[in-house]
Image (cartoon, rainbow, N blue to C red):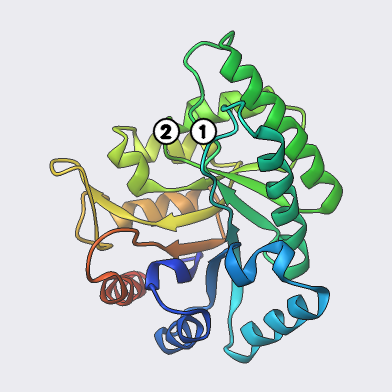
């Protein structure tokens, strides 16, 4: 397996330092953190950023990506400019901290290209992509609301090099999309992968290896498209998230 295994600290449900200790115990190489609270750009001075990089290093960890949660997508006009500025700040933070990848849920791409929401989304991503070009960080759109081919086609209409995809097979499956077709369509755009599993019949997220995704085949496809980045395990629901993440790490190691 050419990908590197990481975990989402948010999925562990632990405070930062305990989460890093748990990640170290699991033996993964990287963690994804959410840029809120103590890790929000406004709350991390340059000294704080250096201290956080040192904290990661002391646990033998790298950052896989920064997650930037949004209350509304970039297709919603209300308070749009503050949201764009907040994402820009996280892009700058990601450059300072190392992953240089920021994951967002940008909003659903409208079915019609002449939909005003499509123009709003395109203009917002254009501005963010150009900002990313300037600061040296990449904005990765979560694959949650449309098939990979649709996302690729939409991004091709935007003149910015720093727009990419966070490939989330579990979310694609829950959305009724073709997981493998989406990976092939997005292959040049994929800069980060979420290890999430799900079941079609119950339409529920489940522990990695217990869903309908053929991980052996998917890992083979990621190798085929020459993806060599992080596969970061996430578990957003359920009462046993920590145990599920640990089991998922063990499951993936079977393929190494």
- Residue 226's disc is none
Residue 152: quadrant of the picture: top right
Marks 2 and 1, the one that precedes in the sequence:
1
Q: Is residue 16 above or below residue 174?
A: below
Can residue 2 be seen here? Answer: yes
Residue 133 horizontal/vertical position (percent): 81, 45
Q: Residue at x 57, y 28 (%)?
A: 76
* Residue 153 placement: quadrant: top right
Q: Are marks 2 and 1 in contact (CB under 8 Å)?
A: yes
3 left or right, relative to 26: right
Q: Residue furthest right?
A: 134
192 relative to 240 in the view: left or right: right
> Is 183 drawn above or below residue 194 in the view shown?
above
User: Label 2: which residue?
Assistant: 145
Q: In terms of depth relative to the viewer, which is nearer, 65 or 4?
A: 65
Q: Residue 181: horizontal and vertical position, in percent?
A: 40, 34
**Other residues around mark 1 within 10 Å, as few (<14) / some (14–19) / many (≥20):** many
Distance in Å between CA atoms under marks 2 and 1: 8 Å
The reply to whether residue 256 is visible in this rendering is no
Q: Nearer the viewer, residue 8 or 197?
A: 8
Q: Disc number at residue 107?
A: 1
């Amino acid at each position: 397996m050419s990908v590197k295994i990481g975990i989402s600290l948010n999925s562990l449900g632990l405070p930062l330092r305990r989460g890093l200790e748990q990640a170290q115990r699991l033996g993964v190489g990287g963690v994804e953190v959410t840029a809120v609270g103590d890790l929000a750009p406004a709350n991390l001075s340059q000294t704080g950023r250096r201290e956080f990089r040192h904290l990661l290093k002391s646990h033998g960890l790298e950052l896989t990506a920064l997650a930037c949660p949004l209350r509304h997508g970039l297709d919603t006009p209300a308070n749009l400019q503050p949201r764009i500025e907040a994402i820009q700040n996280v892009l700058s933070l990601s450059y300072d901290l190392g992953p240089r990848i920021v994951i967002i849920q940008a909003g659903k791409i409208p079915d019609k290209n002449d939909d005003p929401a499509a123009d709003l989304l395109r203009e917002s991503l254009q501005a963010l992509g150009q900002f990313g070009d300037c600061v040296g960080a990449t904005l990765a759109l979560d694959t949650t609301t449309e098939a990979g081919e649709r996302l690729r086609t939409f991004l091709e209409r935007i003149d910015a090099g720093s727009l990419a995809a966070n490939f989330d097979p579990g979310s694609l499956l829950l959305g009724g999309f073709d997981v493998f077709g989406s990976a092939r369509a997005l292959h040049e755009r994929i800069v980060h992968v979420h290890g999430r599993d799900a079941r079609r019949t119950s339409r529920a997220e489940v522990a990695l290896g217990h869903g309908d995704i053929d991980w052996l085949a998917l890992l083979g496809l990621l190798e085929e498209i020459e993806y060599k980045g992080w596969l970061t395990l996430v578990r957003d629901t359920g009462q046993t998230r920590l145990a599920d993440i640990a089991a998922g790490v063990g499951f993936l190691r079977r393929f190494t």
